[in-house]
Image (spheres, helix red, strand yellow):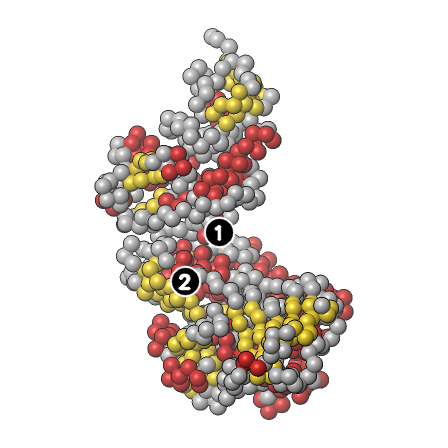
C-alpha cells in the first residue's frame, strides 16, 4: 500500500489521488478555491482565471494544473484575492449585472464570489453593452446581459445533453454566447427545460420562466453562508440554485 | 382661478427667485418665483428637475421582475411600488383572488409601510417646522434639534418607524427593497416567532400614534388661524375606497369628489383608470399634470393622499382611527379637513389606522399559512392601484406572449398632487412673500407648504434638510441684486 500523496495549500497538507487537479483535490478535502467556470461534473475550461493560485511560485489555474507531491500552493493570500477582485470587477462592468433587480441574486456564484472577495464597487467604467433578452422559449428565458462566458452551458449541452444548443462566438472582447441555430432563437432549437444545460448557469442567464423570486430572502443558496462554505465538495451548484 | 400665478403676463420685466433644491422632501425639485420691483409675486412654479425613465427601461424585461425592479424608484415607499406592480401582475397571471394568507401578508406589509413612512415624515421631516415655527432658528430646525428639545418625542418617532420597518422585513425579507410579493401571491408567510415578536411591540405603537394625533391637534388649537389658513385652497380629490365606502389603503374602487363635495365618480374599476384620468404635460416640468377627464385640464386637477382619504371615506374600519377621523372632521366646523396643514393631522390618523390594522392582522392565524400563490387564466394587460403613503399609485403594464413587458405607465402619488402643490405654494407666496423682503424663514414657508404633501419628487430617497439652498434676486436686466446661500449645515449667509 503506497503512502497518500499530499501538497501544501496555504500551509496545510491536502491529499490527492494521481491525476487530480489542485482544484479537485482541494474540493475533495473541503477546501475552497474561488472559481466561476469550473464544475466538478465537466472538463475544466480554465477561462475565468478566478482559481489562479501560486504553485511553487508560478501563477497557474488550479482547475487545470495537476497536483504534484510536495507542491506549495498559495490560495487565499491578499495578493491573489486582490487579483481575483480585479477580475470580478472587470466581469461586472463588461456585462449588465444589476443585482438589485436580478432574480438570481442570492443564488448567483458571481455575486457570492464578489462578496467573498470583498468587492464593494465595480471600480471600472461600465460598458453597458446592448444585449437583448431571448424570451422566445416557452419555459426558459435567456438574459445575455449577465453572461460571464464560463461556457458551462456550452459544455453541459454538448457533453451531457448531446445537443450543442449553445456556443461561444467572436474573439477577445467581442466574445459572446450565442444560441447555436440559424435564427439565433432558443425556441427554434431542441433545448428543453429538463436539459442539464438549463440548470447549470452559475449566474442569471439561463432562467426558468415564471419562477423568479419564488424563494424568499433568507432561504436562497448563499443566504446562510458564503461561497467558501457553501461551495465545497460534494457540490452540485445547480441543485441548490433554486 | 387655479392657474392665476402659473405664468406671468410679462415675465421679461420681472426678477427671478429660485429655491433650488427644495429640502426635507424626497427627491429633487426647485421652486421659482417671478417678482416685480416691489416684490409683488407674479409667477410661482414647483419644478421637478429629475427624470427617472423606469417606464422605458422596464420594457423587454420579464413580467415577474417588475415588482422587484420598479420598487427601486424609491427608497422610502418601495413597498408601495412592489405591491402595485404585484397587483398588476396578478392580472397577468390570472390571480383574480389571492389566497387569504397571501392577501393578509401583503396587507401587513403595506400597513408596515404606511406606518414607517408616515412616522418618518411627521417626526423626522416636518416636526421641526411644526414644533419650532416655520421661521425659527434654522440651526435647530431639524431632527437633531427636535431630539435635543424633546428627546422622548424623537425617540418615539424613531421607534415607530423601526417597528414599521420590522413588519416589512418579516414580510418582504428586507427592510428596504425586499422580494416578498410575487405575481399571484407572496413567497413567504410569517413564522409563529415572527408574529409573536411583532405582537409584543404593537400596543405602544398604537398609543404613540394617538399621542402624535393629540400633538398635531394641539398645534391646530394653539395656532388656529395660521394652521387653518396656511396655503389653503379648494380642490377636488381622489382615492380608493372599499365597496362599503370604508377607507382601504390596499384595494378598492376609485372615488372622486369635487371641491364642493359632489361625487364625480364612485367605486370606479381602476383597471380602466384612463377613462377618468388623463395626463397633461407642461414645458417647465418633468412631472406630468393628471386631471379628471370629465372636468378638463384647467378645472380637473385634484388632490390625493391622507387628507383626501380621511375626508372622502365614509368611515375608517378600525375603531380608534375612526373616532379620530370624526373629531378631525368636526374640528372648528370642518376647517382642518380642508387645510393644507390638515395633511399632517390626517397622516397621523392613518398611522393609527395602520397600527390598528397590523394588530388585527397579527391576531389572524392566516398569516402563518402555507397557501401562498394562486394562478388563473393568463392575461396581457395588468393594472395595479394602491393607496401609497402619499396617495393613489397606479401601475399599468402590457405583457406579450413571451412574458416580456412591452409597455409601462406609472402615475405615482406625487404626480397626482402636482397641480395641488403648485396651488399651495402660490397661496403661500401671496399670503407671506408678496411685497416683502426675502429671508430664509420666509422662503421656508414655501417649503413647509410643499412638505405638507410629503412629496416624493423623484420617488427617490430622502434629503434630511442638509441640501444647500441658493436664492438669487435679479432685476429685470438680469443683474444680481441680492443672493442668499444656505449651506449643507443649514447656515445662511449673504454672498
- Residue B485, given in percent of the width and then of the height, sits at 69, 68
Label 2 crowding class (10 Å Cα cut-off): few <14, some 14-19, many 20+? some
Chain of residue at mark 1: A
In this view of the protein, which residue sits in the foreground, B489 or B336? B489
Left or right of A217 on screen, residue A161: left
Q: Quadrant of the C terminus of chain A?
A: top left
**Residue A100's disc number:** 1
Mark linked to residue A207? none
Q: Is residue B224 toward the left or the right of residue B297 in the image?
A: right
Q: CA distance from mark 1 to mark 2?
A: 17 Å
Residue located at (30% from left, 63% from top): B380
Residue B138 falls left or right of residue A214: right
Same chain, labels 1 and 2: no
Numbered label tally: 2
The x, y position of residue B182, in whole percent, is: 41, 57
Q: Residue at x 57, y 24 (%)?
A: A74
Estimate the x, y position of residue B173 in percent, counting from the top left. 51, 54
- From the viewer's perspective, is the residue at label 1 or at label 2 nearer? 2
Q: Residue at x 55, y 17 (%)?
A: A56
Q: Is residue B457 visible?
A: yes
Disc 2, SS: helix
Name the disc covering residue B55, or none: 2
Q: Residue at x 55, y 74 (%)?
A: B46
- Image-quadrant location for residue B483: bottom right
Label 1 sits on a secondary structure element that is: helix
* Residue B495 place in picture, x, y as percent: 71, 68
Viewer-proximal residue among B466 and B252:
B466
- The reply to whether dot 1 and dot 2 touch (C-beta < 8 Å) is no
User: Residue B67 lies in what quarter of the image?
Assistant: bottom left
Residue furthest top as drawn? A1
Chain letter for mark 2: B
Amino acid at each position: 500500500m503506497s503512502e497518500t500523496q499530499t501538497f501544501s495549500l496555504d500551509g496545510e497538507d491536502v491529499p490527492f489521488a494521481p491525476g487530480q487537479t489542485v482544484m479537485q483535490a482541494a474540493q475533495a478535502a473541503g477546501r475552497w478555491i474561488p472559481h466561476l467556470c469550473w464544475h466538478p461534473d465537466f472538463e475544466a475550461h480554465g477561462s475565468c482565471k478566478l482559481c489562479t493560485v501560486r504553485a511553487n511560485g508560478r501563477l497557474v489555474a488550479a482547475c487545470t494544473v495537476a497536483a504534484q507531491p510536495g507542491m506549495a500552493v498559495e490560495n487565499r493570500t491578499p495578493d491573489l484575492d486582490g487579483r481575483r477582485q480585479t477580475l470580478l470587477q472587470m466581469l461586472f462592468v463588461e456585462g449588465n449585472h444589476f443585482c438589485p433587480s436580478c432574480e438570481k441574486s442570492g443564488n448567483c456564484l458571481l455575486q457570492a464570489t464578489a462578496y467573498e472577495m470583498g468587492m464593494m464597487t465595480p471600480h471600472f467604467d461600465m460598458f453597458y453593452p446592448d444585449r437583448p433578452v431571448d424570451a422566445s422559449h416557452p419555459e426558459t428565458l435567456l438574459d445575455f446581459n449577465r453572461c460571464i462566458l464560463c461556457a458551462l452551458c456550452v459544455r453541459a449541452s454538448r457533453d451531457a445533453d448531446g445537443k450543442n444548443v449553445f456556443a461561444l462566438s467572436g474573439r477577445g472582447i467581442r466574445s459572446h454566447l450565442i444560441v447555436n441555430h440559424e435564427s439565433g432563437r432558443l425556441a427554434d432549437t431542441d433545448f428543453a427545460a429538463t436539459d442539464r444545460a438549463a440548470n447549470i448557469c452559475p449566474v442569471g442567464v439561463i432562467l426558468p420562466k415564471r419562477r423568479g423570486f419564488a424563494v424568499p430572502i433568507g432561504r436562497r443558496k448563499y443566504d446562510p453562508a458564503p461561497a467558501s462554505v457553501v461551495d465545497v465538495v460534494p457540490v452540485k451548484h445547480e441543485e441548490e440554485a433554486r | 382661478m387655479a392657474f392665476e400665478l402659473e405664468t406671468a403676463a410679462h415675465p421679461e420685466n420681472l426678477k427671478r427667485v429660485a429655491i433650488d433644491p427644495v429640502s426635507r422632501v424626497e427627491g429633487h425639485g426647485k421652486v421659482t418665483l417671478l417678482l416685480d420691483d416691489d416684490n409683488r409675486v407674479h409667477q410661482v412654479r414647483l419644478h421637478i428637475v429629475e427624470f427617472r425613465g423606469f417606464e422605458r427601461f422596464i420594457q423587454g424585461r420579464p413580467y415577474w421582475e417588475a415588482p422587484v425592479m420598479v420598487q427601486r424608484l424609491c427608497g422610502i415607499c418601495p413597498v408601495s411600488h412592489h405591491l402595485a406592480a404585484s397587483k398588476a401582475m396578478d392580472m397577468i397571471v390570472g390571480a383574480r383572488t389571492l389566497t387569504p394568507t397571501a392577501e393578509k401578508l401583503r396587507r401587513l406589509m403595506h400597513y408596515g409601510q404606511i406606518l414607517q413612512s408616515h412616522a418618518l415624515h411627521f417626526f423626522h421631516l416636518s416636526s421641526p417646522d411644526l414644533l419650532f415655527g416655520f421661521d425659527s432658528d434654522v440651526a435647530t430646525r431639524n431632527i437633531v434639534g427636535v431630539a435635543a428639545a424633546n428627546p422622548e418625542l424623537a425617540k418615539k418617532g424613531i421607534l415607530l418607524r423601526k417597528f414599521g420597518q420590522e413588519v416589512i422585513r418579516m414580510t418582504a425579507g428586507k427592510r428596504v427593497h425586499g422580494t416578498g410579493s410575487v405575481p399571484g401571491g407572496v413567497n413567504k408567510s410569517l413564522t409563529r416567532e415572527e408574529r409573536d415578536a411583532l405582537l409584543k411591540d404593537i400596543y405602544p405603537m398604537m398609543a404613540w400614534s394617538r399621542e402624535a394625533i393629540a400633538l398635531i391637534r394641539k398645534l391646530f388649537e394653539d395656532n388656529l388661524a395660521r394652521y387653518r389658513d396656511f396655503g389653503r385652497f379648494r380642490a377636488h380629490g381622489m382615492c380608493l375606497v372599499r365597496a362599503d365606502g370604508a377607507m382601504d389603503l390596499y384595494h378598492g374602487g376609485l372615488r372622486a369628489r369635487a371641491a364642493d363635495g359632489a361625487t364625480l365618480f364612485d367605486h370606479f374599476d381602476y383597471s380602466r383608470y384612463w377613462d377618468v384620468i388623463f395626463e397633461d404635460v407642461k414645458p417647465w416640468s418633468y412631472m406630468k399634470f393628471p386631471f379628471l377627464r370629465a372636468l378638463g385640464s384647467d378645472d380637473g386637477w385634484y388632490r390625493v393622499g391622507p387628507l383626501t382619504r380621511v375626508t372622502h371615506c365614509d368611515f375608517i374600519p378600525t375603531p380608534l382611527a375612526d373616532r379620530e377621523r370624526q373629531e378631525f372632521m368636526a374640528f372648528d366646523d370642518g376647517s382642518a379637513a380642508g387645510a393644507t396643514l390638515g395633511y399632517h393631522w390626517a397622516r397621523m390618523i392613518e398611522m393609527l389606522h395602520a397600527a390598528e390594522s397590523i394588530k388585527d392582522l397579527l391576531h389572524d392565524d392566516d398569516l402563518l399559512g402555507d397557501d401562498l400563490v394562486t394562478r388563473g387564466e393568463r392575461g396581457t394587460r395588468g393594472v395595479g392601484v394602491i393607496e401609497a403613503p402619499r396617495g393613489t399609485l397606479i401601475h399599468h403594464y402590457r405583457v406579450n406572449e413571451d412574458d416580456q413587458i412591452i409597455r409601462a405607465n406609472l402615475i405615482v402619488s406625487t404626480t397626482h398632487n402636482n397641480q395641488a402643490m403648485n396651488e399651495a405654494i402660490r397661496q403661500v407666496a401671496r399670503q407671506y412673500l408678496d411685497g416683502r423682503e426675502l429671508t430664509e424663514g420666509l422662503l421656508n414657508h414655501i417649503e413647509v407648504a410643499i412638505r405638507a404633501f410629503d412629496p416624493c419628487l423623484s420617488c427617490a430617497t430622502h434629503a434630511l434638510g442638509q441640501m444647500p439652498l441658493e436664492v438669487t434676486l435679479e432685476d429685470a436686466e438680469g443683474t444680481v441684486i441680492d443672493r442668499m446661500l444656505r449651506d449643507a449645515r443649514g447656515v445662511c449667509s449673504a454672498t
